[in-house]
């Protein structure tokens, strides 16, 4: 088997497993556990890539990093046209926007809150701005997710898979009453057989 996912527990690499289950591509998982004290990825990942981050995939010997790039690559190389709207269509443009919004915009205030939480009172001056940005991004997502549980069109897309992680964070932080459509989106993701297979193979993460 040539496709390997370097999978860090409690991380966004869970989405890559889900994506692979949806497109039906065979793959192997190499597991890595976070340091129980620092919560950082282990040094072993540095042997795979100089930044030592996850997700990483290896396909035919090539190492690819970044969730969005991995998602686009897998859909193009192994997806057979599934999970991506027709190129040149308006939906395809929206798909690209949302796919990269997930990491480029939505995760920024989430990560800021995670890091500043470790600073205690020293982070107090930053907290209102971070909370405002969290609310702005979650509210934007809430306003755009369809009643059908998808951000684009009438069926699951790779962008939905990418957006699942920030939506899960919103629910984990107790925001489901404020963002009921995001909560419904998360629930719809979690009942999919492919999501459940990915969870079984990759392990539970952040309480899911």
Image (tube, helix red, strand yellow):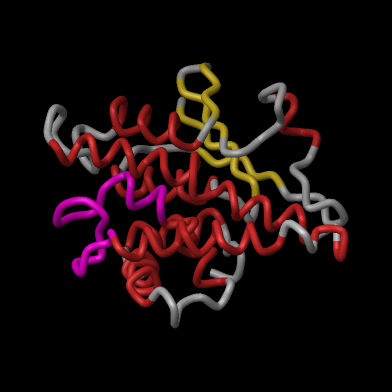
Q: Quadrant of residue 51?
A: top right
Q: Is residue 137 magenta?
A: no
Answer left or right for 2 relative to 36.
left
Q: Could you say where residue 156 lies in the image, as x and y percent from the top left?
A: 24, 53
**Nearest to the observer: residue 73 or residue 167:** 167
Residue 45, above or below 115: above
**Nearest to the observer: residue 124 or residue 81:** 124
Q: Could you say where residue 206 lies in the image, as x and y percent from the top left?
A: 61, 65
Answer left or right for 189 relative to 154.
right
Say which quadrant the N terminus sits in: top left
Answer left or right for 149 relative to 85.
right
Residue 82, above or below 186: above
Q: Could you say where residue 39 lies in the image, as x and y percent from the top left?
A: 78, 52
Q: Write down the region rendered in magenta.
A: 144-163
Q: What residue appears at the point 17 percent right and 39 percent down from the top-left corner?
A: 85
Residue 44, above or below 10: above
Judged from this view, the residue extending furthest toward the top is: 61
Q: What residue appears at the point 80 percent right and 34 percent down from the top-left corner?
A: 43
Q: Quadrant of residue 155?
A: bottom left
Q: Could you say where residue 113 lies in the image, as x and y percent from the top left?
A: 68, 57
**Nearest to the observer: residue 182 or residue 195:** 182
Q: What residue appears at the point 30 percent right and 30 percent down from the top-left corner?
A: 78
Q: Is residue 154 magenta?
A: yes
Answer left or right for 89 relative to 72.
left
The secondary structure that most of the magenta stretch takes on is: loop
Q: What residue appears at the point 39 percent right and 36 percent down from the top-left corner?
A: 71
């Amino acid at each position: 088997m040539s496709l390997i996912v370097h999978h860090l527990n409690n991380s966004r690499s869970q989405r890559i497993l889900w994506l692979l289950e949806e497109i039906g591509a065979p793959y192997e998982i190499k597991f890595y556990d976070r340091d129980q004290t620092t919560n950082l990825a282990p040094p072993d990942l540095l042997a795979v890539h100089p930044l030592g981050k996850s997700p990483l995939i290896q396909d035919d010997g090539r190492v690819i990093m970044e969730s969005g790039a991995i998602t686009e690559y897998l859909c193009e190389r192994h997806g057979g046209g599934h999970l991506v709207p027709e190129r040149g269509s308006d939906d395809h443009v929206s798909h690209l926007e949302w796919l990269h919004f997930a990491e480029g915009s939505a995760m920024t205030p989430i990560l800021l809150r995670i890091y500043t939480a470790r600073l205690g009172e020293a982070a107090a001056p930053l907290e209102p701005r971070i909370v405002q940005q969290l609310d702005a991004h979650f509210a934007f997502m809430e306003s755009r997710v369809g009643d059908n549980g998808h951000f684009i069109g009438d069926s699951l897309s790779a962008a939905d898979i990418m957006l699942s992680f920030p939506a899960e964070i919103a629910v984990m932080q107790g925001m489901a009453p404020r963002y009921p459509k995001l909560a419904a989106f998360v629930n719809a993701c979690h009942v999919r057989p492919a999501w459940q297979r990915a969870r079984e193979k990759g392990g539970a993460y952040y309480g899911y």
